[in-house]
Amino acid sequence: MTLTLAIVGRPNVGKSTLFNRLVGKRLALVDDQPGVTRDLREGAARLADLKFTVIDTAGLEEATDDSLQGRMRRLTERAVDMADVCLFMIDARVGVTPTDEIFAEILRKRSAHVLLAANKGEGAAADAGVLEAYNLGLGEPIRLSAEHGEGLNDLYTQLQPIADLYAEKARSEAPEVDVDLDEEDDDPDAVPQPTNAKPLQVAVVGRPNAGKSTLINQIVGDERLLTGPEAGITRDAISLRTDWNGTPMRIFDTAGMRKKAKVQEKLEKLSVGDGLRAVKFAEVVVVLLDAAIPFEQQDLRIADLAEREGRAVVVAINKWDVEEDKQAKLRDLKESFERLLPQLKGAPLITVSAKTGRGMDRLHDAILRAYEVWNRRVSTAQLNRWLTGMLEAHPPPAPQGKRIKLRYMTQAKTRPPGFVVMCSHPDKMPESYNRYLVNGLRLDFDMPGTPIRIYMRGQN
Ligand code: GDP
Ligand code: GDP
């Protein structure tokens, strides 16, 4: 299953130019039979490591007749319905036109994922148009120059988490891990540092009113507008690029877009979907709880989702300024946390006040640390010494009198750490033994909080 991206927008904004750039060659038309309008073309696109199908609605000619709007609408709707994600393009040098607004409206109603591109973005003449694009309420515009090939990395950054989401769907439940037993141990300290080119991706998730917007404002300061004015419910997420205490970050905001939701049911639906997308996007997920009503069903669901998706998790307890007996409350919270979210054992619990800014530095440090642990690599030599000790302390079970032998262990992946153990009868290995090893790894290699996976593999 490949992701399909439709490029839509009014004539002349640069859709074909981008299409050609993504596809890299001239292509056959989709409706390539006589009598069928040649208005949609499709091609195999590539952007860095992403492979997807791209649809172009380029057949639309600039026309002055009244039928343009109707045709445009039909064509766009068709493209939207064929696609998993739409890239809505405007001309940044012209700014947002009334026709663009009609498009935005269609997309908000009809498309699950919308990315916004302000094209012809090279040069200062585009500055005003890029800013105006925020007003469409479709999230952060990607400043592109299809002609010059600029901004494609920002397109990649926004497309990649959506592509992940689709890839995940296609993948089976049990992940395949490539085991390379010859792989020599990497430098255990080699944790990729967030850089301007690759900022740390953070999502702030939590129930409505937990304080997500307030927290994000506190992080990014006043430098960025979170939501377009009167944006309404936009269906796309907003991500913000910021430097927080000197750490380059991209923060995924799920809050702004629900502000205007009127119907509770709608709000619930949106928040689940947003939460999922936010989690997919993130390297570190901050689960923000309201100290007054912590660990509600919705909070637990999203925290569990983050763990299952293998993200590093930091739990932040907000509105700490209003708590009176802070010590007793913290004890309570810790106890509930361990009981309700055992799968996140050791994840940091940080008390903050998004309103006053208290605890923000600790939150920043916890995010960095969670990221570091998530990237941790343990050498094979260390692991196998450790495994020997663990086996001696508590031998594996012997179902039907046959002891399961654990022979060898290696770290197969990071982000999150994943380990492969070669053993006899992997199918008979009880879950409890797996847990014993996971908890041991956490303690002995100082990997609190991060999801750890151990895969048992049979030999021969
Ligand atoms: P479409 O009708 O939306 O498919 O637009 P085209 O791709 O045909 O482009 C319309 C015009 O805009 C062409 O003359 C392109 O060369 C030009 N164009 C496309 N992208 C850019 C860009 O990034 N910068 C500038 N300056 N011109 C562009
Ligand atoms: P969101 O729906 O998660 O984005 O929540 P908001 O950021 O809109 O905050 C919801 C309400 O909680 C607003 O009235 C905020 O002023 C309030 N709030 C947010 N953070 C704090 C905090 O740290 N302390 C207190 N006392 N109120 C807060």
Image (cartoon, rainbow, N blue to C red):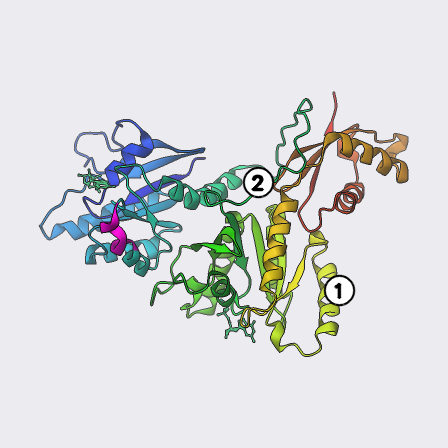
Which class describes the residues within 10 Å of circle 1: few (<14), some (14-19), or many (20+)? few
The answer to whether residue 76 is above or below residue 182 is below
Name the spot of residue 364 as percent of width and height, x first: 58, 57
Name the spot of residue 147 as percent of width and height, x first: 25, 37
Name the spot of residue 422 as percent of width and height, x first: 75, 28
Residue lying furthest front? 246
Residue drawn at point x = 25 percent, y = 54 percent: 129
| 188 left or right, relative to 400 | left
Q: State the residue position of label 2.
A: 192
| Residue 400: quadrant of the picture | top right
Q: So how many labels did they put on this image?
A: 2
Which residue type carries mark 2?
Pro
Instruction: Assign the C terminus to one quadrant of the image.
Output: top right
Q: Is mark 2 within 8 Å of ligand 2?
A: no
| 133 left or right, relative to 264 | left
Which class describes the residues within 10 Å of circle 2: few (<14), some (14-19), or many (20+)? few
Give the number of the disc on residue 156. none
Instruction: Say whether residue 300 is visible.
Output: no
**Magenta residues: mostly which secondary structure?**
helix
State the SS at label 1: helix
Q: State the residue position of label 1.
A: 335
Which residue type carries mark 1?
Glu
Q: CA distance from mark 2 to mark 1?
A: 34 Å
Name the spot of residue 446 as percent of width and height, x first: 74, 46
State the SS at label 2: loop
Residue drawn at point x = 19 percent, y = 45 percent: 11
Of the two numbered discs 2 and 1 in the rendering, the one whose residue sits closer to the viewer: 2
- Read off the magenta span: 123-130
Task: Answer whether residue 242 is magenta in the image.
Answer: no
Residue lying furthest left? 65
Proximity of marks 2 and 1: CB atoms separated by less than 8 Å: no
Instruction: Assign the N terminus to one quadrant of the image.
Output: top left
